Image (cartoon, grey):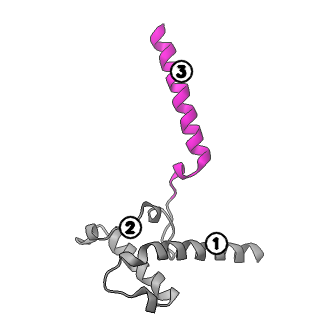
C-alpha cells in the first residue's frame, strides 16, 4: 500500500510538472483562475490535439519532447530504450568496439 501511494504521488508530481510547463502555451485561458485538475485536463486536451495526426492545426501546438513517449492521464506509455542511461552507455561501448574492430579489419 505504501509503494502504491508513493507511486501515485510521483505520477501526480510528474503530471503537474508537465502541466505547469505547458499551460502558458495555450491561448485563451487564464491558468491563475483554474484549479489544478482543470489545468491538467486542459493540457491533456492540448496534448491530444498536438499529437492527433488527423488534426490539421496540430502544427500550431508546440509541446516539449518530454511529453512524447510518456504517460499522460491514462494514455498508453511507449518506452524509448535510450532514455535508460544503461543502454546509452552500452550504445557508446558498442560504438567504441565497432570503431576498434573496423579499424583492425581495415589493417588486414
Q: Which residue is mark 2?
A: 63
Residue of label 3: 100
Q: In front: 70, or 28?
A: 28
> What span is colored magenta in the figure?
79-108
Identify the residue at horizontal 52%, vertical 48% (top origin): 82
Tell me: 25 left or right of 60: right
* Whether label 2 touches label 1, CB < 8 Å: no
- Is the residue marked by circle 3 packed among few (<14), some (14-19), or many (20+) residues within 10 Å? few
**Residue positioned most to the right:** 2
Q: Could you tell me which residue is drawn at 42 percent across and 73 percent down? A: 22
Image x and y of residue 102, in percent: 48, 19
- Which residue in the rendered view is the most extreme toward the left? 56
Q: Earlier in the sequence, mark 2 or mark 1?
A: 1
Label 1 crowd (10 A; few <14 / some 14-19 / many >=20): few
Which residue is found at the position 41% from the left and 83% from the top?
42
The image shows residue 12 at horizontal and vertical percentages of 59, 77
Classify 47 as above or below 100. Answer: below
Secondary structure found at label 3 = helix
Q: Residue furthest bottom?
A: 33
2 or 3: mark nearer the eye: 2
Question: In the rendered image of this protein, does residue 71 appear above or below residue 99?
Answer: below
Q: Is residue 57 left or right of residue 5?
A: left
Helix, strand or loop for the magenta stretch, by majority:
helix
| Spatial separation of the CA atoms under disc 1 and disc 3 | 43 Å
Report the Cα–Cα distance between label 2 and label 1. 21 Å
* Quarter occupied by residue 50: bottom left
Sequence order check, earlier mark of 1 and 3: 1
Residue 72 lies, in percent from the top left, at: 49, 73
Give the left or right position of residue 33, taking residue 51 as reference: right
Q: Position of residue 73 (x, y in %)?
A: 50, 77
Residue at mark 1: 10
Q: Looking at the picture, does residue 39 appear above or below residue 13?
A: below
Amino acid at each position: 500500500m505504501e509503494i502504491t501511494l508513493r507511486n501515485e504521488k510521483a505520477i501526480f508530481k510528474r503530471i503537474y510538472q508537465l502541466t505547469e510547463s505547458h499551460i502558458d502555451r495555450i491561448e485563451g485561458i487564464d491558468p491563475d483562475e483554474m484549479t489544478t485538475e482543470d489545468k491538467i485536463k486542459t493540457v491533456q486536451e492540448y496534448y491530444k490535439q498536438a499529437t492527433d495526426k488527423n488534426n490539421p492545426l496540430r502544427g500550431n501546438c508546440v509541446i516539449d519532447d518530454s511529453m512524447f513517449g510518456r504517460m499522460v492521464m491514462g494514455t498508453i506509455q511507449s518506452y524509448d530504450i535510450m532514455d535508460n542511461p544503461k543502454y546509452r552507455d552500452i550504445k557508446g561501448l558498442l560504438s567504441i568496439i565497432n570503431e576498434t574492430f573496423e579499424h583492425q579489419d581495415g589493417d588486414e
